[in-house]
Image: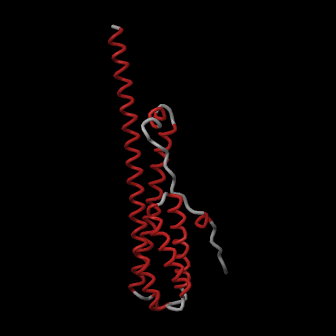
Amino acid sequence: MTILIVLAVGVLIALMIVGLYNRLVKLRVRAQNAWSDIDVQLKRRADLVPNLVETVKGYAGHERATLEAVTAARTRAVAAQGAGPAERAEAEAALSGALRGLSVAVEAYPELQASGGFRDLQAQLAETEDAISNSRRYYNAVVRDLNTAVQTFPSNLLAGPMGFQEREFFEAAAAERETPAVRF
């Protein structure tokens, strides 16, 4: 009778360990997938930027400094593709800021705003920005779940020895957190 109890307890512990391990694996895979989704959206935005810059050049060629800032920020963002979330967020924040500057500069050119090609590019960029925002939220939610599992008992007993580590959140850079100035 005691052998059956010991065996049953052993089987329950083994099942619990397998369940915890599988949960950690699922969370890690979801985090990797979510990061990949962010990467795809950021690449899509980077691919749209040259088309946007070329379209604006045709109408507002003398906005050279703004266009160069956007191009330089895109180059930094593309170069940061292999970096971690913090470095990537910083590079992408610079690109977002440069694109906001371009949007402000474009407001002075009604003929550009009336251009169908420019409106299409602007709409695609806005759609991509929304997708990036949604991907970031999802990634951070998955990372929160993974980090919680890595830190809490009893899964923390397996996480360290099995090589599961906390992941870094994809946080907004300081420049993105600033409140924009509104001038009247």
Q: Is residue 31 shown left or right of residue 92?
A: left
- Compared to 147, does 67 lie above or below? below
Please, which residue is most extreme toward the right here? 184
Specify the quadrant of the image occupied by residue 101: bottom right
How many numbered markers are drawn? 0
Q: Residue at x 41, y 40 (%)?
A: 24
Residue 10 x %, y %: 36, 20
Residue 11 x %, y %: 34, 22
Q: Residue at x 63, y 66 (%)?
A: 178
On the rendered image, what quadrant is the C terminus found in? bottom right
Specify the quadrant of the image occupied by residue 18: top left
Q: Residue at x 50, y 32 (%)?
A: 153
Please, which residue is most extreme toward the top here? 1
Q: What colour scheme governs how the chains and residues are painted in the rendered image of this protein?
A: secondary structure
Residue 157 x %, y %: 47, 32
Q: Is residue 170 shown left or right of residue 19?
A: right
On the rendered image, what quadrant is the N terminus found in? top left
Q: Residue at x 52, y 67 (%)?
A: 91
- Compared to 72, does 163 lie above or below? above
Front in this rendered view, residue 138 or 150 = 150
- Compared to 152, does 79 lie above or below? below
Q: Is residue 4 shown left or right of residue 87?
A: left
- Compared to 23, does 104 lie above or below? below
Residue 70 x %, y %: 51, 78
